[in-house]
């Protein structure tokens, strides 16, 4: 798959794509990332990409024309149409289900906004999807773009050291959409705290029941909406319901 990223700061992506386990996805081109700078498509000696907003107000607004010309070049290089994604506070919250869809797609063009915002006319005519990481504001779309790329990259075959790793992640359907359980490693005693006995028992059924109970308890405490969704979807067993009642 291929992601074309429109950004005024392409240099931010180099260390990101060369670090950590997900670099395998970029090195192998399983997830190809092509960077485009709208400033290269701006007019005039100063290559200006922003201007003051009509109606006044603080900050500057990214101009439609440099972004549109940059997008045209990215789409032409791809040789086909592609979804155009803008990272925006009004976008749909990025969730695991959406990441799975993107990870199985042919990619997209990711638009990283800056300043006070982007000329609405570009958004209305060129953007097909808007995505939000949550109810907060960042200085630009580069961090959300990296978040999406990282989430997509780790789902590609061979990227993680263990193929089962992402299957046991929080929100994964294999966990019925629950949060993951706590994890422990050596030493068995640390600062007066031990490892829970079931994990040392060697009894696989007992271990899995403990992990399931922990996932249920943590999810009920932190994200009860996920418990409601799992219950509505018929994904909770009688043993699960009993464990929830015991924790409550």
Image: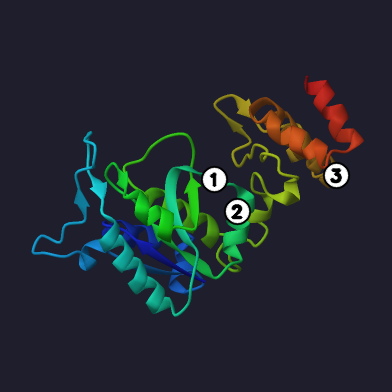
Residue at 65% over, 37% down? 182
Residue sitting nearer the eye, 236 or 50: 50
State how many labels appear: 3
Which residue appears at 39% of the width and 62% of the height?
17
- Can you tell which of label 2 and label 3 is closer to the viewer? 2
Q: Is residue 237 visible?
A: yes
Nearer to me, 57 or 110: 57
Which sits earlier in the primary sequence, circle 2 or circle 1? 1
Residue 213, image x, y percentages: 78, 33
State the residue lying farthest toward the bottom: 79
Which residue position holds label 3? Answer: 205
- Dot 2 alpha-carbon crowd within 10 angstroms: few under 14, some 14 to 19, many 20 or more: some
Query: Could you say where residue 195 lies in the image, as x and y percent from the top left?
Result: 67, 33
Could you say whether the residue bearing mark 3 is in a helix, strand or loop? helix
- Quadrant of residue 226 within the rendered picture: top right
Mark pair 2, 1: CA separation: 10 Å
* Residue 127 shown left or right of residue 205 in the figure: left
Q: Name the residue under label 1.
A: 92
Element on which disc 1 rests: strand
**Mark 1 or mark 3, which is nearer to you?**
1
Residue 113 disc label? none
> How many residues crowd around disc 1 within 10 Å: few (fewer than 14), some, or many (20 or more)?
some
Q: Check the picture and name the quadrant holding the C terminus.
A: top right
Residue at 40% in and 53% down: 123
Which mark identifies residue 98? 2
Quadrant in the rendering for residue 170: top right
- Marks 2 and 3: CB-CB under 8 Å? no
Q: Residues within 10 Å of mark 3 (few under 14, many from 20)?
A: few
Above or below — where is 189 with respect to 176?
above
Q: Which of marks 1 and 3 is nearer the N terminus?
A: 1
């Amino acid at each position: 798959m291929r992601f074309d990223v429109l950004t005024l700061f392409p240099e931010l992506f180099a260390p990101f794509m060369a670090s950590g386990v997900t670099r395998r996805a970029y090195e192998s081109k399983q997830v190809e990332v092509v960077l485009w700078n709208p400033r290269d498509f701006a007019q005039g000696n100063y290559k200006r990409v922003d201007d003051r907003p009509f109606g006044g107000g603080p900050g500057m607004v990214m101009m439609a024309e440099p972004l549109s010309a940059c997008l045209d070049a990215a789409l032409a290089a791809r040789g086909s149409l592609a979804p155009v994604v803008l990272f925006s506070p009004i976008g749909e919250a990025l969730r695991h289900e959406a990441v799975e869809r993107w990870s199985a797609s042919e990619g997209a063009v990711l638009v990283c906004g800056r300043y006070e915002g982007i000329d609405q006319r570009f958004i209305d005519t060129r953007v097909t999807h808007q995505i939000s990481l949550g109810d907060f504001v960042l200085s630009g779309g580069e961090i959300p773009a990296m978040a999406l790329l990282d989430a997509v990259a780790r789902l590609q075959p061979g990227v993680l050291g263990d193929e089962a790793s992402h299957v046991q992640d929080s929100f994964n359907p294999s966990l019925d959409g629950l949060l993951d359980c706590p994890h422990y490693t050596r030493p068995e005693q640390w600062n007066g705290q031990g490892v829970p006995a079931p994990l040392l028992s060697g009894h696989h059924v007992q271990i899995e029941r403990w992990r399931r109970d922990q996932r249920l308890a943590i999810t009920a405490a932190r994200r009860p909406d996920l418990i409601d969704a799992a219950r509505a979807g018929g994904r909770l067993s009688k043993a699960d319901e009993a464990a929830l009642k015991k924790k409550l």
